[in-house]
Image: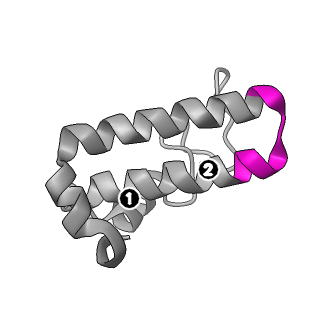
Amino acid sequence: MKNLYFPKDKEKGKTKTMLKLVEEIGELSEAVLLDDLSKISEEIADVLAWTASLANLYNIDLEKVVYNKYQKKCPKCGNNPCTCENH
């Protein structure tokens, strides 16, 4: 994502990139409500792409932060699979 879109994302800025991510989450919500698997797949890809773009603008290594937080276990209960009541 960084190689593909970083110059445009930098020009767009953090706030507009975040708003684009929120827009894509809204589109994903609509697809889920319609139970349209093809559209859900497309929108999940868009949400991940905009999340990566936002991470790039903050110079965050997305793979590293996800791995560090979850490391094969739930960060709340510490179990795998998760045994949290409200998850």
- Whether the magenta-drawn stretch holds residue 34 is answered as yes
Using the rendered view, name the quadrant where residue 10 is placed: bottom left
The residue drawn where x is 44% and y is 62% is: 67
The residue drawn where x is 43% and y is 33% is: 22
Residue 47 appears in the rendering? yes
Question: In the visual, does 14 lie left or right of 49?
Answer: left
Instruction: Give percent across and percent down for residue 84.
Output: 64, 29
Image quadrant occupied by the N terminus: bottom left
Instruction: Give percent across and percent down for residue 56.
Output: 26, 62
The residue drawn where x is 57% and y is 52% is: 73
Residue 58 appears in the rendering? no
Q: For the residue labelled by badge 2, is the local secondary structure a helix, a strand or a loop?
A: helix
Which amino acid, mark 1? Ala
Question: In the visual, does 41 lie left or right of 44?
Answer: right
* Residue behind mark 1: 52
Count the numbered circles shown: 2
Using the numbered discs, state the Cα–Cα distance from disc 2 to disc 1 in whole angstroms. 12 Å
- Whether the magenta-drawn stretch holds residue 77 is answered as no
Which secondary structure dominates the residues rendered in magenta? helix
Q: Which residues are magenta?
A: 33-41
Q: Residue furthest top?
A: 86
Q: Colour scheme in the image?
A: one colour
Contact between labelled residues 1 and 2, with CB atoms less than 8 Å apart? no
Q: Residues within 10 Å of mark 1 (few under 14, many from 20)?
A: many
Above or below, comparing residue 6 to residue 80 in the picture: below
Q: For the residue labelled by badge 1, is the local secondary structure a helix, a strand or a loop?
A: helix
- Residue in front for this viewpoint, 11 or 1: 11
Instruction: Give percent across and percent down for residue 4.
Output: 35, 75
Instruction: Give percent across and percent down for residue 65.
Output: 35, 58
* Residue behind mark 2: 44
